[in-house]
Amino acid sequence: MGNHEEYQKLEGKIFTKSFFILLSVVLLGFYFVGVRYVKGIGAVSNMSDGYPWGIWITYDVATGTAIACGGYAVAILVYIRNRMQYHPMIRSAILTSMFGYGLAGFSVMVDLGRPWNAYNFFIPSKWQANSAMFEVALCVMAYSTVLILEFLPAILTSIEQSKWDRMNAVRNWLHPKIAPDQKSMQDKLEMVRLGAVWLKPRLNKVLIFFIVLGITLPTMHQSSLGSLLLIASTKLHPLWHTGFLPLLFLLNCVFIGYAIAILESIISSYSFKRPFETEELSGLAALIPFVTVIWLCVVIGDLAYRGQIGAALKGDFYSGWFLTEFLLVASGSLLLFFKKLRRSPRWLFTSASLIVLGGALYRFNVYLIGFNPGQGWRYFPSFAEVMVTVGIVALEVLGYKVFVALFPVLPNTSAHGGGHAPAKKAAAKHGKKAALDVPHAPVEAH
Amino acid sequence: MKNPSRRDFLKLAGATGAGLLASRAGSALANEGTQINNEELGMLYDATKCVGCKACMASCKRVNSDYGSLSYEKAKFDSDGLWDAPSDLSGSTRTLIKLFKESEQRWSYVKYSCMHCQKPSCVSVCPVSAMTKEKVSGIVDYNKNTCIGCRYCQIACPYNIPKFQWEKALPQIVKCDLCKATNLREKGISACAEVCPVGAIKFGKRKDLLSEAHQRLKDAPDRYVPHVYGEHEGGGTNHLYLASMPFNKLGLPDIKPEAPAEFSEKIQHTIYKGFIAPVALYSTLCFIAVKNMKKHKGHDGHDQKQEDK
């Protein structure tokens, strides 16, 4: 009935080899963040007055939040389109969204030249509603908060059931002189636990309103991420500069969101050696083409309306990038039209990757590749700049790995099978409809 | 079950698209959004008069050094730092003279500094109102005490005027403010216009500058390209140009008469007018989600999955 049945913690050690590899990447990235704060942005990045936004904005913010739209896309599916069979996927999707948005916020603070003035966002007299950036900033902050609230039930469940083994181990490890008294610590921990028990049902009652807020906010700021570049009418190449930027960015984040939810599930099943959730994934995958086809139609229709089809097929630098982006999304969607391919984790992985790549490339095209501030300006990210971004992504993966071990996030596979059940068991638990398709579900052996 | 929600989604998408189309149609109909105020202050730079002495650059730095334009940039050959030789507008240079040379006979100087647009993009995009346009003087001003350093103004400015101090740990944006806090307040004229020895920079109200510019075009038509740059570009600017060569060769971009900020704000306002659309979206979604939840709770015993989150 409860969450402990629908979701489970991942068994196994946290401090594995990959943990330390990721950690070292994170530390390298943070070293360069330190350099940036001491010596200025110019010391670590290749950004210039012509290209004032580099990969920190293009990847971490504009693309990273789209990739973090899994929580948004799955929430639409579950709560608005009422497909409760996808409910087990939502926690891991929300977790990745939480990290994606949190770290996008972090890298904004690295990128801002005068971050200590950021409090001005909360001073109404300084508000500037004409600015798409203002809208994006407030929405992203609000959405990050909502994501934390959405994830809170998992933490509360964990606290509720916790026997505080780790806490006690730390206490025992400390020198007796500085270690807190066993009894008083236990009392305090018990109070925390009772607080969690008290809070959980109350939070559950109002949670749906936060969940819906968590659908409204991305709708707003994802479209505004497109609006950001509306102003650059002389700098952004006409292939991408259109009044439809907000709509295109919104649709783009929805299909990236579904595709990334598929990728995440496949990757975590593979690396944590859990059964593939083929049934849910193929259902999810069937939705993607609806969104991508609308997106592709808007792109083509808009180009035709503005008379830019010729520029798209010209074969120069810009048209090359445009066609790459377009074909990646189109080919990925095409694969998903075939029911057979949707049932194979391998093909699902391929097509979802193509779509994520194409969708992300679209955002790169708008923010960097199609952006030309005039003669003489050039931009290619520096090593340090890339490492900051890589470090942030590594932190995201690291956080995900730690959280799935600490909190019940991943769909429960043991409820019906015990231990590491094969894929068909996992599929079977989702009811009659699913059970019919089980024989076709390929089980990848690893 | 899936049909109504898909329809909702399409409705939503359609509404957004229709809104955008409507905004497009609106922009085509009338340009009444940009009302040009010719009483604002500005400058007229006549490239045919300029002798390239760079006295304007020197006096700009001298006068405005306390406002971010302090540092000098060494030339490559000048290891002792005797000269200030910036190669472009930068975090320490607000105005700059450049020479464009097509051949020995055809060349022209050109001065860069803030255009003080009638409808400035930088003001339109600044999320915290650090960029402002003064109501009376029309000066586009920057307040470093509010600025968060997001550099959106740099993305937005079609003339690439705002510059960022990339090398500093505590950077700021640097751009011309028409000597608002310095020379203009003390002497009523910008430092560059005051010091120009040949009268290539004329300071004054936009209407006077415009009539002067058109007079010059009329008096010596073969001396100039028959166009006052800035009269209509990007909704009009208060910094106007006359030159003997096509302006885009001098690094002044071809810009449509509609201000870029006009276009973007129209779309943003269509979507967020009175905050109605977001509120409507939120309440509709709430309605659907709560209804779905209730439906689900009703089926508890039979349904395969329990809604419990």
Image (tube, coloured by chain):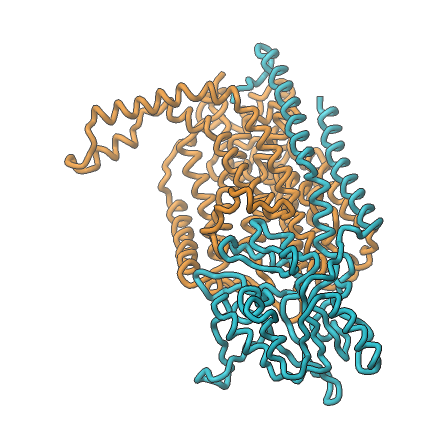
Q: Which hue is chain B drawn in? A: cyan
In-image side of A147 versus A39 (left or right): right
Residue A65 is situated, as x and y percent measured from the top left of the image, at 57, 44
* Residue name at image x 60 percent, y 43 percent: A135
* Residue name at image x 37 percent, y 22 percent: A195
Q: Can residue B241 be seen in this view?
A: yes
Residue A48 is situated, as x and y percent measured from the top left of the image, at 56, 65
Q: Which of B221 and A261 is in front in this view?
A: B221
Q: Which residue lies furthest to the front in this view?
A: B187
In-image side of A383 versus B267 (left or right): left
> Image height check: is B307 above or below B124?
above
Q: Is residue A286 visible?
A: no
> Image height check: is A319 above or below A220?
below
Q: Quadrant of residue B220?
A: bottom right
Q: Which of A270 and B32 is in front in this view?
A: B32
Q: Which residue lies furthest to the left in this view?
A: A177
Residue A94 is situated, as x and y percent measured from the top left of the image, at 53, 34
Q: Quadrant of residue B251?
A: bottom right
Q: Which hue is chain A drawn in? A: orange
Total numbered labels placed on residues in the image: 0
Q: Nearer the viewer, residue A417 or A102?
A: A102
